[in-house]
Image: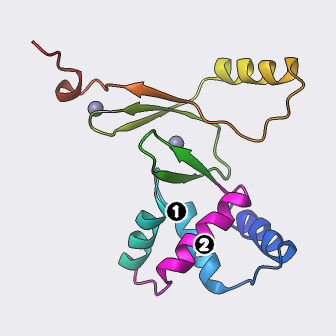
Amino acid sequence: MKAEAEEKFREFLKNGKNRITPERFEVLNAALDYQGHFGADDLYIAMKKMNSSVSRATVYNTVELLEQCQIISKRNFGDNMNRYESCFGKMNHEHLVCTTCGKIIEFSTPRLEAIIEEVCRQNGFEMTNYTFNIFGKCSDKNCSKKDE
Ligand SMILES: [Zn+2]
Ligand SMILES: [Zn+2]
């Protein structure tokens, strides 16, 4: 799986006349290994903890390249912060976002996918990607507690 992502990224860098550097591949690997959703800064911090010497600027611009290359996708969970997640070899999925504690629950349902595909087809629309977030309160008792 990783080898495929590396190959795709290498092609992308070459075609875009971007330099192919080991640092960029280090960022790629860290992004693929990251569990869950991350901001560019989260990734930078995670890499620092693994004693990586890649600079913050490189992490930031490589994350952007990885998004353009569609190895990771950008998510916005309503707080104006860009977060990413690896979409390589992973199924499309949707998010339930708790606006109280910030917890994000992932789900996927083929029925929803079928509807989205149908809507695109009906409109002669070629989908590149989509995001679907449901905002609300999670089942945690501190979040769902009703005001009395
Ligand atoms: Zn919550
Ligand atoms: Zn997700």
Q: Nearer the viewer, residue 80 or 59?
A: 80
Residue count near mark 2 (Cα–Cα under 10 Å), binned few <14, some 14–19, many ≥20: some
Give the residue at x 52% y 78%: 57
Q: As shown in the figure, which amino acid type bears the numbered disc 2? A: Asn
Give the residue at x 78% y 74%: 13
- What secondary structure is marked by label 1? helix
Residue beneath disc 1: 33
Mark 1 or mark 2, which is nearer the start of the sequence?
A: 1
Q: Nearer the viewer, residue 67 or 112?
A: 67
The answer to whether 135 appears left or right of 1 in the picture is left
The stretch in magenta equals: 50-72
Task: Note whether 93 is above or below 50 in the view shown.
Answer: above
Task: Note whether 37 is above or below 112 in the view shown.
Answer: below
Report the label total. Answer: 2
Q: Residue furthest left?
A: 148
Task: Note whether 116 is above or below 86 in the view shown.
Answer: above
Give the residue at x 54% y 74%: 59
**Is the CB atom of the residue marked by disc 2 within 8 angstroms of ligand 2's nearest atom?**
no
Residue count near mark 1 (Cα–Cα under 10 Å), binned few <14, some 14–19, many ≥20: few
> Residue 145 in magenta?
no
Residue beneath disc 2: 61
Residue 122 is situated, as x and y percent measured from the top left of the image, at 86, 17
Residue 79 is situated, as x and y percent measured from the top left of the image, at 41, 43
Q: Residue furthest right?
A: 124
Spatial CA span between label 2 and label 1: 18 Å
The answer to whether 52 appears left or right of 112 in the picture is left
> Residue 70 in magenta?
yes
Q: Nearer the viewer, residue 129 or 141?
A: 129
- What secondary structure is marked by label 2? helix
Q: As shown in the figure, which amino acid type bears the numbered disc 1? A: Asp
Indicate the quadrant where residue 98 lies.
top left
